[in-house]
Image: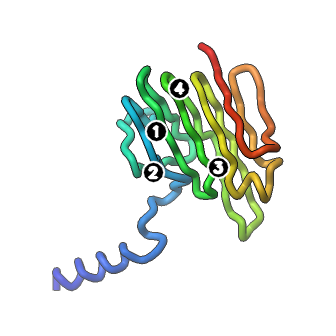
Amino acid sequence: MGKLVCFVLLMVLMLPGYSRAEGEIGSIKTLKGKVFIVRGGTTLPAEEGAAVFQEDLLKTGYNGALGVILKDDTTLSLGPGSELSLKEYVFEPRENRFSVILRILKGTFVYMSGVIGKLAPDSIRLETPDSTIAVRGTRLMIKVDN
């Protein structure tokens, strides 16, 4: 009986939709050097393929770099010594609900819009300590000094 239960559980986990963690908004595609995810007050070392979630804080060390792809194919890149908060992310095309709010706290950041940028560009907001940027194009770079 135990082997049958394990087999059924394994088959269910292999179904589409079960491979992603609940609430995952994207994943880490590339990284170099020291890179961390701060989630719920806990600092975790980042790994390629790791899921990212709304409200995660992404941090790169002095020699770090990070590439993230969100569910709508938005691409985020962080250079050395950077911090980016994934404040809000909603990608529900069937309900026509879209929102991207990212806060770059320090360092360098490159943003390339995905599907949300095409369907609802007004729903994208990039924040820095001194300003808020409304995205109407497809690609931009931001540098925030300490």
Give the residue number, with chain letter if any, for mark 3.
Answer: 89
Looking at the picture, the colour scheme in use is: rainbow
Q: Nearer the viewer, mark 1 or mark 2?
A: 2
Q: Position of residue 90 (x, y in %)?
A: 67, 54
Circle 1/circle 3 CB separation < 8 Å: no
- For label 2, count other residues whose C-alpha is less than 10 Å away and answer few (under 14), some (14-19) or many (20+): many
- For label 4, count other residues whose C-alpha is less than 10 Å away and answer few (under 14), some (14-19) or many (20+): many
Give the residue number, with chain letter if any, for mark 2.
Answer: 51
Q: CA distance from mark 4 to mark 3?
A: 20 Å
Q: Quick one: label 4 or label 3, which is nearer the N terminus?
A: 4
Would you identify the image quadrant in which residue 21 lies?
Answer: bottom left
Give the residue number, with chain letter if any, for mark 1.
Answer: 39
Residue drawn at (69%, 41%), measured in percent from left and top? 101
Q: CA distance from mark 1 to mark 2?
A: 11 Å
* Amino acid type, mark 2: Ala
Q: Quick one: label 1 or label 2, which is nearer the N terminus?
A: 1
SS at badge 4: loop
Q: CA distance from mark 4 to mark 1?
A: 16 Å
Give the residue number, with chain letter if any, for mark 4.
Answer: 82
SS at badge 2: strand
Q: Quadrant of the N terminus?
A: bottom left
Q: Nearer the viewer, mark 4 or mark 1?
A: 4
Q: Nearer the viewer, mark 2 or mark 4?
A: 4
Q: Quick one: label 3 or label 2, which is nearer the N terminus?
A: 2
- For label 1, count other residues whose C-alpha is less than 10 Å away and answer few (under 14), some (14-19) or many (20+): some
Q: Quick one: label 1 or label 3, which is nearer the N terminus?
A: 1
* Amino acid type, mark 1: Arg
Circle 2/circle 4 CB separation < 8 Å: no
Q: Say which of 108 and 8 sits in front.
A: 108
Q: Is residue 83 visible?
A: yes
Q: Quadrant of the C terminus?
A: top right
On screen, residue 140 versus residue 136, left or right, reads left
